[in-house]
Structures are given as C-alpha cells and as structure tokens.
Image (cartoon, rainbow, N blue to C red):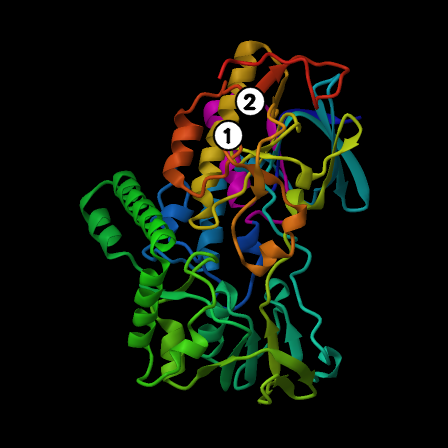
Amino acid sequence: MSEHFDVLVVGAGLSGVGAGYWLQKHCPQKSYAILEGRARMGGTWDLFRYPGIRSDSDMFTLGYSFKPWTDPKAIADGPSILRYINDTAREYGIDQRIRYGQRVASASFSSADARWTVQVDKGAERVVYTCDFLYMCSGYYRYESGYTPDFAGMGDFRGALVHPQAWPENLDYSGKRVIVIGSGATAMTLVPEMAKKAAHVTMVQRSPTYVVARPSRDAVADFLRAKLPAKLAYSLVRWKNVGFGMYFYNLCKRNPQKVKDYLLGLVRQQLPAGYDVGRDFTPRYNPWDQRLCLITDGDLFTAIKEGRASIATDTIDRFTENGLKLTGGQEIEADVVVVATGLFLQQFGGAQLTVDGRKVELSKTLNYKGMMFSDVPNLAATFGYTNASWTLKADLIGEYVCRILNTMDAKGKKIAVAHNDDPNLPVENFVDFSSGYFQRAVDTLPKQGAKKPWRLHQNYAKDMLALRFGAIEDGVLRFADPSPQSTRAPDTEKAAA
C-alpha cells in the first residue's frame, strides 16, 4: 500500500523548509510531507562540519523573506544558520511534516492517473508514496561525497587526508602543518580558521579567485534594527543588499576591467607592501564569471600578514610521503592535507525520473522559468542564484508553485506541463558559469532557451516580476486532464499568450 499526498517535497534543507511554509500559507487545503534522506534537517548547514563553516552570502538575503534574521552577524556561522532553519521549522509546525531517513530512489509519472509514484529507500526497506505534485528541494550536489581529483601519489602520503564534505569529528590539527588544496569559498574559510590552531597553513591553488573583504556585521542593519520594528528593518536591509548585489553584478558584466582593478586595489590595501598580488590574487577570468569569495573581517589577509598562513599558486605534481611536490619544484611538508576541491553536481538527489515509462533526460529538456522542465508534468525544482543568495530564488519558486497549484484547482485540471512549440528556439547551457563543478556536469544539466519563459534570469527583480506578479497562463504552461496519451504532446488547454 502507498500513502498519498497532494504535494511531496523532497529535501528538508533551507529550500524544503521554505517550501513547507509557502504551501501552508497559500495552499492550506493541500496535504504535504517532506522526505529527507538524512537523519536531520538543515541540508548543507547540517552536513558540513568543517572549522569555520559559514555563509558566503549575507543573511538578510540568505534568510527567508518571511522570517527576519535577528542574529547580530550578517555573515553567519554554520551552526547559527542551522539553528535558524530549525527554529523556522518549529515555529510554523513544518518539523511535524518531515520524514527522516527516507531517500528518494525514483519517481514515475502516469498521465492516465495524473500522479507521481515515488519509490523511497527507508533503510533496508522500500516504501512507496504517491502524489499529485512533486517538489524537488534536494539541492544541487551529491551529499555522499565531494569531488577529489586523482592526484598522483595520493596513496604515498602518510598524514591525514580530508575532504571538507566528510570532516572527521576527531581531527586534531593543533600545532600541525596543514595544506588546504583549493581556492574557493571553502578554502578561503578553512585557511584562516585552521591557522588559529595549526603551526602553519598553506593554501595551494592552481589559479586565484576574486576575493572581497567584508565586515561580519552590517552597520546599516544594526542602525535600522535599533530604530525600527524587526520585520521592517529586515525588509529594508534585504532590499538594500539585493539592490547593491544586482548593481555590482551588472557593473562586472558592463565594465569587467574597471571592477577587476577596483577589487585588486582593495586586496593590495589588505596585504603587506610588495606582496605579489598578481600571482596569488589575480584570476584569469573576469569578475563574476565565477562566484566571488567573501573574506569575513579580512581574516585571511590577517593570517597572511601575521605569518600563520601563506599561499602557493602552482599546479600539483604529486603527493609525497610528507606532503606535496608542486610542478614548479617547490615541496611543501604537511601533517594534514585538506582537499577543498569542490562538489559533484547532482540533480534531484540522484533520483531517476520517468514520465509514462520514458526516462527523463534533463540534458534534453528546457528549463522553464528556472523551476520546471519541458514535458515533465507536475514537477518543480528549486535552484538558486549563482550570483546572489540561494534563498532569494527559493522563496520566489515556493510562491510560484503555490500559484500553479491554485490555478490547477481553479480550472479543475490535474496536469500542468511546460511545452515548447518552437523547434527552432536557440538553446544555451543552463548557466553561463565557468566554475569547475559546473563545467564537469554541463552535459547533464537542462538547457535554457534564448527567450522567456525558457530564459534563466540571474536577476531577482526580473524573477520577482515574472514569478510573483507575472501571468501563470503564459501560452507555454499548459493544463490538462488525465490522459492515456504521452504528456510529451498532451491534449491540453493552452492559454493565449
């Protein structure tokens, strides 16, 4: 026997808890449950336990639109973010809807029944759910393990080899020599934090990343929160940060060289005179071709100035018994090597989807409004911004899913599916982003079209207009009754554009 829900949410992290809130607010008549593969809620903020884990976005935009962030720090540590997610879930009763230790293995949609059948692994047991709408909030990367390149000689190293995604609870690096391989947000967080206890930390990077030092507290937020009600102050600061983020991103695209010079000038001010900024802090790409790295209160620069940390920019020739040998000939000894080399992108938590017996190949679909997929009915997925806080987009998607569900009810229709009528529509990669973890998975990701609603905006204002205020019946999203026919070309009610 299977248990049925109107909506099944997959994932109890930041997105999944938010999805529960929006369903309760806008679709209170709908039954829903949240399936979480792990034993606790929180997603990323429960999984990652490495020293110094923190947000790389301000909490006024990473926080939910409906629940003010009240902690003094705008750039928050992981445990504080996890506590915020847990508090939100308890406050709205969302925690009572979560079913832990239940990992979705597959889901199949039947047009004849207008229903998803979801196969779930619950320990050694296989359980089955059915739902009318499947809402994927399972993140974008594989939780089981991170990405580690196949460096030569890794088996020769006699020290501790660690990936941040699987941090050992008992790792003691006090007074030890540490190497952190990588130049992304995780490495930038780990190096200054580990340098507080380690004898020395060396960050080994193949190429530099743009970095920006930012105070952990927002002075404007502190002022407004002292003068105004919490929700009003939160909303004003949120819009301030959204507006600045969009302005800065657009400036990077319009005049990359000007922004590059500005960012490198700020770095030079933070480091000792004569430091080789060109070698260690000047990327080969333009600003925002990859995410900028946030340096909280300039902690990385402080560690470098005090001699507790250093950077080696070179490729790795091989591991040795005592550390690393770089291509340029330098040998760095270490007791601990942290491989902060990234993630494996994974859609839907690795679950396999089928529609009327046909396997869903995401790379052959078009992404609709950044949340649905062409010819995949009654399914939405949360994917946040690459150039701004994840939750900004997650909130908008949560509201839009509810608008779709309510429109289906109003029309008395059981199926909602996005369908492309233009066989000549130019298509592009899902995102224009050069980070390694995207490039490794680009062939598995959906495509985007050259025009809306198939165009993926990296712009909160445009998405707000489209998702919060734009028409549901846009000539592309179609509503249908159950049919034995394939949903690839359904007999649908198509609204006028």
Of the numbered discs in the image, which one, if any, rests on residue 453?
A: 1
Regarding residue 136, the answer to whether it shows in the image is yes
Residue type at numbered disc 2: Val
Q: Earlier in the sequence, mark 1 or mark 2?
A: 1
Q: Nearer the viewer, residue 479 or 255?
A: 255
Q: Is residue 224 above or below residue 417?
A: below
Inspect the magenta stretch and tell me whether residue 28 lies in it: yes
Instruction: Please provide percent x and percent y for residue 73.
Output: 34, 58
Where does the magenta region start and end?
A: 13-42
Q: Quadrant of the N terminus?
A: top right
Instruction: Please provide percent x and percent y for residue 383.
Output: 54, 42
Q: Quadrant of residue 152?
A: bottom right
Q: Residue furthest left?
A: 227
Q: Is residue 324 left or right of residue 451?
A: right
Q: Is residue 74 above or below residue 468?
A: below
Inspect the magenta stretch and tell me whether residue 303 lies in it: no
Q: Residue at x 18, y 46 (%)?
A: 227
Mark 2 lies on residue: 476
Q: Is residue 438 left or right of residue 272?
A: right
Q: Residues within 10 Å of mark 1 (few under 14, many from 20)?
A: many
Regarding residue 27, the answer to whether it shows in the image is no
What secondary structure is marked by label 2? loop
Total marks shown come to: 2
Disc 1 to disc 2: CB gap under 8 Å? yes
What secondary structure is marked by label 1? loop
Q: Quadrant of residue 67?
A: top left
Q: Residues within 10 Å of mark 2 (few under 14, many from 20)?
A: many
Q: Residue at x 59, y 54 (%)?
A: 438
Residue type at numbered disc 1: Pro
Instruction: Please provide percent x and percent y for residue 454.
Output: 53, 33
Q: Nearer the viewer, residue 462 or 347?
A: 462
